[in-house]
Image (cartoon, rainbow, N blue to C red):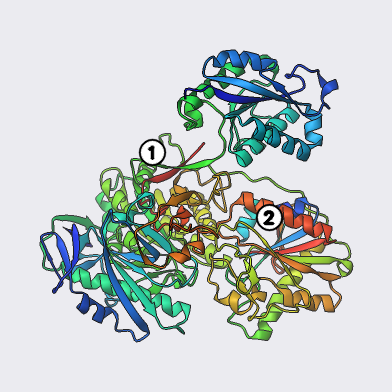
Amino acid sequence: MKLELGKIIIDDLQFAVETRISDKTLFINQEELLELIGEDSRIIEINLDIVHPGEDVRIIPVKDVIEPRVKVKGPGGVFPGFISGEEMVGSGRTHVLKGVAVVTTGKIVGFQEGIIDMNGLGAEYTPFSKFHNLVVDCEVKENIKQHEHEEILRMVGLKTAAYLGKAAKEIEADEVETYEHKPFLEAAAEYPNLPKVGYIYMLQSQGLMHDTYVYGVDAKKIIPTLMSPTEIMDGAILSGNCVSACDKNTTYVHQNNPVIEELYKYHGKKYNFMGVIITNENVTLADKERSSNFTAKLAEMLSLDAVIVSEEGFGNPDADLIMNSKKLAGKEIKTVLITDEYAGRDGASQSLADADPSADAVITAGNANEVIDLPPMEKVIGYQDFADVIAGGFEGSIKEDGSISVEIQAITGSTNELGFNNLTSRSY
Amino acid sequence: MSNKLRIVHYLNQFFGQIGGEDKADIPLRKEDGAVGAGTALNNLLGEDAEIVNTIICGDTFFNENIEESKSKIKAMLQEIKPDLLVAGPAFNAGRYGVACGTAAEIAKTELGIDVVSGIYPENPGYEMFKQYAYFVETSDSAAGMRSALPDMAKIIKSYIQKDGELKSPAEEEYLPRGVRKNVFVEERGAARAVKMLLKKLEEKEFETEYPMPVFDRVEPAEAIRDMKKTKVALVTTGGIVPKGNPDHIESSSASKFGEYSLEGVMSLEQASYETAHGGYDPVCANMDSNRVLPVDIMRDLEKEGVIGELHNKFYTTVGNGTSVANSKIYAEEIAEKLNAAGVQAVILTST
Amino acid sequence: MVKEIEKAGLAVVHVATVVPISKTVGANRIVPAVAIPYPLGNPALSESEEKKLRRSIVEQAIFALETDIDKQKVFSGEKEEAF
């Protein structure tokens, strides 16, 4: 499988008469877009807003962030299983609008949505303050059940990203990167003397607001399996969860999975990057045991020497992480784990819910419990009142002047466990 | 700073030059200026700082009157308003180490005053209180005073120079406080992961960013001999609360626990109970909270005489991202209440 | 929390789904629960079957409280594990 990823750099976003790209600006026909994404009869109203990096704007509560992409050549389309059909993706050519993101927001569904501040201290903690964002604020009818509400918003976000992506189809890319993934036996034969490494991609799958989708399939229902690193670049894995804004994998980070990008850097030079094993984080002990057993087995079947394992979420998924660590070590496969920590506001508490000596090489994305003070913002898109109840907030989080004292847990993407950011934690 | 840093020094009866073991029961007292080893420390600090008062307390008195000693120290510090507390050094004297650590905890958590101390790593006071002070490592006996004081003076000077923002234990030379602090670095996590992977593959040395903890063990409590006469209580971390969450227990990082009456409650009805826990799909628990807190079954067992009685209160908190330290505190308080109410057994449910 | 309650002298049993975490942290009496969102229930069952299931778990918990142990033990009914 060979995928050419063509990046079109965008440095401005504006509403206009026609949706098109010109001079590094993405122009959006609001009416046309609203008609397309507002089709669902359960939607009452959708409001669109454009925000730029550095503006005094706060978006709260954030559900998902998605990057506009479009399939130019090759089988399938972006977001298979939802926007596109059942064809396998990850080959051909895909265009990406770089510097732009779709951010979905609306009345709170669960307790887990997040905050994105476009400037000030909060902006340093979220990667999404650096993009030109199209914020989609969607209201649904009163009697809609929570599971439906989440699904409606998810589809609105994906449809928007797909619509915007289409504008890039005929545009010439500013940069093209090519990623190749050969069938396993060929791949093994290509670099017979290099150690084989793999990526174990743990997906949150615990129910409402805690789900992930693979080709449209709820990750709760999968048995760990193999995927090509390039399929993920076409949106084969996407988010249905907010498992705590800080360490939920937004669809954006799935599309731009940094572990896959970084692993490719030394592929064929220092190791042979064989592929991706996806696994889930279910809510029963039996499922956890089965998935970790299966994961270790797949790693062994690929004759992997070493793996990077990324977790999603915290708490009971720490048990999945440790199970994976133990069982891979049991097969003499070297591991590096990427996780985040919940060490309490004073940083003195135990960071993970489970532990094992086999987990001796850990990268941390930071302590999610650290409290920071967000300055008041001139404009708030969404509902600021929810800061008190979202995970990481507490009674009295919001001050009268509009400033918010909150754990970084509430900031979208702040402790992302794919290693997207530069935050870490040290012992003092 | 143009003013001298004002320091209060905490000493035990021996280093406070009052006496040895025979004087370990002397109560807290405050002296002006430096006393004993404090004088030497004062000289080392020169123009940058001075010990304005010394608090002395017998080690036995302190450990046998902890609450009283804590409030007295707090009151003294509130009155003097020092910029820094220096405690000990305690070397390997256990009770002295605990006293120094306790004083540090009060100063740091209740008054926001930083603390510098010195201790031998195996002194239990270190493990118990390491997060509240900058402890320099000392030898295990007072013979080490000759190096302990200069080491402490060095940290104090660095503290003054950096306006209180001391760097890592390795750089400043103090014992690790077991506190995790967030830091922004040059490389993103995924790049650091690949670098660590390469080091592992090449069998080179690497340093994990998070060393795994080791857990303590508790002796199993005695089994219940006669369940038919036993009062059993229900506790949960699944966040079950009366509808509306009247005490606003947080959906994550709970800052409190709730105590709710079960008087006349035979089962947790959908109309009256819900979950506040934000870490799991709440639908099932909201429909029937007995699924997390089995009140209905406990009432059946009570009626049938299998258990003596279901305690008339239940305790709840949210186990989602709530730190271990806080969980310990809630559990301690809950246990105290249960003991006072004559409860002998507990079923604790978690999600 | 289980350990703190036990330190205070109360007999305590932990009913939890993620038994490995309970084991690692060091709870002494552990009873496996059904699933994270419904540790003592199962929405797929009828009301009476669910109550039966809940009762069997609570009975395991009572049994655990009445059993002398000298180290950690998982009380799962059919397969007993002491380690």
When the figure is inspected, residue B103 is found, relative to residue C7, above or below; the finding is: above
Q: Name the chain under label 1.
A: B
**Tag 2 and tag 1, C-beta contact below 8 Å:** no
Dividing the picture into quarters, in which one does residue A103 lie?
Answer: bottom left
Closer to the camera: disc 2 or disc 1? 2
Q: Disc 2 on helix, strand or loop? A: helix
Q: Disc 1 on helix, strand or loop? A: helix
Give coordinates of residue A361: x percent, y percent. Answer: 46, 43
- Label 2 neighbourhood size at 10 Å, few (<14), some (14-19), many (20+)? many
Q: Tell me the CA gap for discs 2 and 1.
A: 43 Å
Q: Which mark is residue B199?
A: 1
Give coordinates of residue B297: x percent, y percent. Answer: 74, 76
Q: Nearer the viewer, residue A312 or A330?
A: A312
What residue is shown at x 40% (from left), y 48% (from top)? A306
Could you tell me the amino acid type at mark 1? Lys
Lateral position of residue A306 relative to residue A68, left or right: right
Quarter of the figure with the C terminus of chain B: bottom right
Q: Which mark is residue B330?
A: 2
When the figure is inspected, residue A424 is found, relative to residue A290, above or below; the finding is: above
Q: Nearer the viewer, residue A346 or B280?
A: A346
Q: Earlier in the sequence, mark 2 or mark 1?
A: 1
Lateral position of residue A220 relative to residue A261, left or right: right
Q: Nearer the viewer, residue B76 or B222?
A: B76
**Res. A284 in view:** yes
Give coordinates of residue A279: x percent, y percent. Answer: 44, 63
Could you tell me the amino acid type at mark 2? Tyr
What is the count of numbered marks?
2
Dividing the picture into quarters, in which one does residue B25 lie?
Answer: top right
What residue is shown at x 73% (from left), y 28% (from top)? B96
Q: Name the chain under label 2.
A: B
Give coordinates of residue A101: x percent, y percent. Answer: 27, 63
